[in-house]
Image (tube, rainbow, N blue to C red):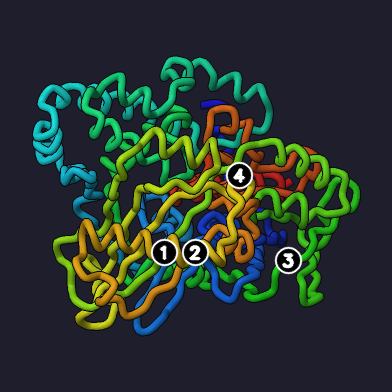
Amino acid sequence: MNAETTLAADATDLQPTGKTACVVGSGFGGLALAIRLQSAGVRTTILEGRDKPGGRAYHWRKDGFTFDAGPTVITDPDCLRELWALSGHDMADDIELMPVMPFYRLAWPDGTQFDYSNDEQHLFDEIARLNPADVAGYQRFLDYSAAVYQKGYVELGHVPFLDFKSMLKAAPALARQQAWRSVYSMVSHFIEDERLREAFSFHTLLVGGNPMKTSAIYALIHKLEKDGGVWWAKGGTNRLIAAMVTHFERLGGTIRLADPVKRVHTYGKRASEVETESGWKARFDAVASNADIMHSYRDLLAGTKRGASYAKSLGRKSFSPSLFVVHFGVEGAWPGIPHHMILFGPRYKGLLEDIYDKGVLPADFSIYLHHPSVTDPSVAPDGMSSFYALVPVAHMGKLSVDWDEMGPILEKRVLDEIEKRLIPGLHDRIVTKFHYAPKDFAQDLNAHMGSAFSLEPVLTQSAWFRGHNRDDAIENFYLVGAGTHPGAGIPGVVGSAKATAGLMLEDLAR
């Protein structure tokens, strides 16, 4: 076990008595970090600009429906349970997790469907139905996924990469796993059928990555889901956020809502004071930002040499796409539509090129359809169902669109497709609806160019090449969330909190 691994494992044993910390932003990463700090005796304050906690896991209640902004796929529940166990509590006392089965139903325009789950025999049968020869190939892919899961998630997922030397130490293991190859390329090495190649490579889209470019290390998601399952928080993802807030406050932590941070002031090489839009100011021994990484440096550290220089560096990096999301409530129950569906369009590679490379709004699309009320009827009024339909779109740095004009048009196109393929007469059944576009990500979340997942998860923007968990120049300024190691997704940002907490607790204990 190297020094960094020891740090990540043992940091929660440190007790920096009397020290204070501020966490800017209350997304999953920010809340997980704050819980870790408060559990270790650091008096921690969370500052949140919006009226509710959650960050990207915001929610709306409208016409009796609960609509989660996302994320909606909960994997590795143990990484969440650990946040309660640090102080001898049980997560189950605050929130109920409900299993989702199948994990996803994938559907293609020709009518082919594929149910994906961790029921091994059922999965083998589903694969054999599309291509019998791929059952053996899938088993080899699973072995590969298990190997990269062990190295990329278990061993390196919670370890901060603070210098290039740490990257070099990890390089041989990453090379052995052919990390330079894409997820799609590696899946294709094992699997012949194009539909199955799509079925086992689309997961990177859930963390903002292009399957054609994202490192094959991200094939670990398959093993993560197989071992830990896919879950839903009863009442919605928002209730999991609420449970984290409840636990944080139980430990003595403080959260301030509806008061955006305006500036993180510095003195010399240290963050000295945090100021909000209302004029509230306070000094802390350590400051961590769960805000968008560009916003953290360009805006919160505006006026500092470090803020300007790193914002300029970030401007040269590639950011993940944005999303267009249609939330809608409909009459009736739809038990035949599972909790998660992927409605693939007629193209896969070409569509990804349009989104990630060309920055155009194509005529076709793939849809992630979320139907939580089939698992949890509490999120919709009696006799009704709650849905959201998500379509990846290029971020605003590549796609110049007037979303006030295009939003209603794309909303209708998405609903038309769902009506055609799944819910006859959908438009007549809708009782409430609204959409969320890239400009909303930019305005509500300070997301750079409206990106939904921060920096694109390619190999050259991973680990040491991603935002560092502790800033290189401001010695008590830290990052947590999608823009830092290991990346987006609930396990990713909760993992970043573990890495960042380790550094903060060690520094504060000095």
Residue occupying the point 62% across, 55% down: 447
Q: Residue at x 51, y 69 (%)?
A: 245
In front of the other: 238 or 350: 350
Label 2 or label 3, whichever lies nearer to me, is 2
Q: What residue is pinned by disc 1?
A: 411
| Residue type indicated by callout 3 | Val
Quick one: label 1 or label 4, which is nearer the N terminus?
A: 4
Other residues around mark 2 within 10 Å, as few (<14) / some (14–19) / many (≥20): many
Where is residue 13? Give x, y as percent.
Answer: 56, 48
Name the amino acid, label 2. Answer: Gly
SS for dot 3: strand
Marks 2,1: beta carbons within 8 A: yes
Q: Quadrant of residue 471?
A: top right
- Label 4 neighbour load within 10 Å: few <14, some 14-19, many 20+: some
Q: Disc 4 marks which residue? A: 398
* Nearer-the-camera pick, 305 or 429: 429
User: Who comes first in sequence, dot 1 or dot 3?
Assistant: 3
Q: Does label 2 or label 4 sit earlier along the sequence? A: 4
**Image disc number at residue 468:** none
Given residues 240 and 36, the one toward you in this image is: 240
Q: x and y percent of residue 349 in the render?
A: 39, 33
Q: Residue at x 59, y 42 (%)?
A: 319
Q: Residue at x 36, y 54 (%)?
A: 74
Name the one closer to the observer, 161 or 377. 377
**Amino acid type assigned to the residue bearing label 4 in the image:** Lys
